[in-house]
Amino acid sequence: MGRTVAVVGATGAVGQDLRRLLQWRRFPCDDVVFVASERSAGRKLPFGDREVTVRALTEPGVFDGVDLALFSAGGGRSREYAPQAVEAGAVVVDNSSAWRMDPDVPLVVTEVNPEAVTQARKGIVANPNCTTMAAMLPLKALHDVFGLVSMVATSFQAAGGAGQQGMDELLAQVPPLLAEPELLRRDGAAAAKLVEHHVHAATLAFNVVPWLGTHVQDGYSDEEMKLRNESRKILDIPDLTVSPTCVRVPVMAGHAIAVRATFARDVDVDRAVGAFTAFPGLEVADVPTPLEWAGRDEVVVGRIRPDLSDPRSLNFFVVGDNLLKGAALNTVQIGELLVERSIV
């Protein structure tokens, strides 16, 4: 076989899942290369029955002999080093926002648009934003039956969406606030001042924060614009109308999205449920929650109900683990597609 796979960002939260999934799914490769920052270089990480020494991303020749490079190291590093990996002979699957909207880089959810991997003209395939990812499976299932026209999407995104530091900040806030239950009830503003926040836009513990990301235009954040722009590209609906709102909630892992989707044809709920049930990687549950689906590979959809005023609209609630299907799992699945289609 002679195939070598590199994991770039191997010591990070998503990188850990990438390493685990490569082993658990028995990814077809003969060798692995683990790459991280200079700070992590020299560490030894287990892989199967051996240990692999982490190499620095800045090390000359780090991608020599690599056939497939799975990047989860942030947009800046991906923009700089993904082309270097391609030049060295690798195909790159990138988990950052760096390449998603490049017209020469396919944006792929493996169950939704697998054929797009053949269009990697720059040698790079992009992994979508973790919130967009979860919504794509049920929306594609419905689009194939009813013809998607527009959606209103409100996300409830876990602290883990901001990485390990996002989860650490949430956990650090809980004990001081838990010790002041009366203050939480009677003077929330004073309670919020008991803790610091640097990662999230406001105190997240015992709270809901209706802002994440950076401002882009007209009061919308980049996270919200990703939900619109990436959905259009993945579903190949350039004029899809999207009204997004992204909210951070005190959950460790697992993003949820409340969706009102509108279609070209009248919606039949039974047909919609049937489409969900038959769609790969998608499960149906009455009341799906991020806690109960954390650590699960599947995306789950529930609260499926007709709109109260529009026969062409359907309301539903979708949940997916943002660190698994939302990041590491889809990245590995894209790699598997590239192997299956003899691109790698």
Image (spheres, rainbow, N blue to C red):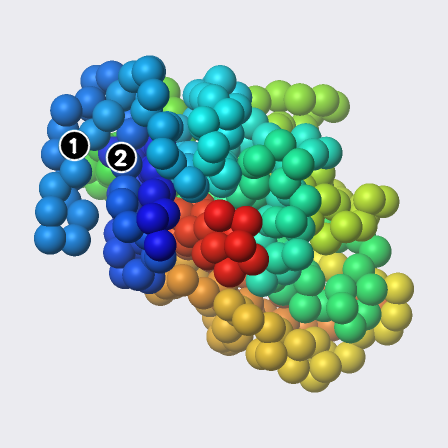
Q: Residue furthest front?
A: 1
Q: Is residue 165 above or below residue 250?
A: above
Residue in front for this viewpoint, 29 or 304: 29
Relative image position of residue 211 (x, y in whole percent): 54, 31
Q: Is residue 320 above or below residue 201?
A: below
Residue in front for this viewpoint, 340 or 261: 340
Q: Is residue 313 left or right of residue 107?
A: right
10 Å neighbourhood of mark 1: few (<14), some, or many (≥20)?
A: some
Residue drawn at the location 27% of the way across and 45% of the way down: 31
Q: Is residue 144 left or right of residue 123?
A: right
Report if the CB atoms under discs 2 and 1 are less than 8 Å apart: yes
Q: Which image quarter: residue 317?
A: bottom right
Relative image position of residue 77 (x, y in whole percent): 44, 21
Residue type at numbered disc 2: Phe
Q: Secondary structure at mark 1?
A: strand
Q: Is residue 56 visible?
A: yes
Relative image position of residue 320 (x, y in whole percent): 47, 57
Where residue 229 is drawn, which disc sits there? none
Relative image position of residue 134 (x, y in whole percent): 54, 55
Q: Secondary structure at mark 2?
A: strand
Residue under label 1: 53
Q: Which image quarter: residue 122?
A: top right
Where residue 34 is drawn, which disc sits there? 2
Residue drawn at the location 43% of the way across and 41% of the way down: 68
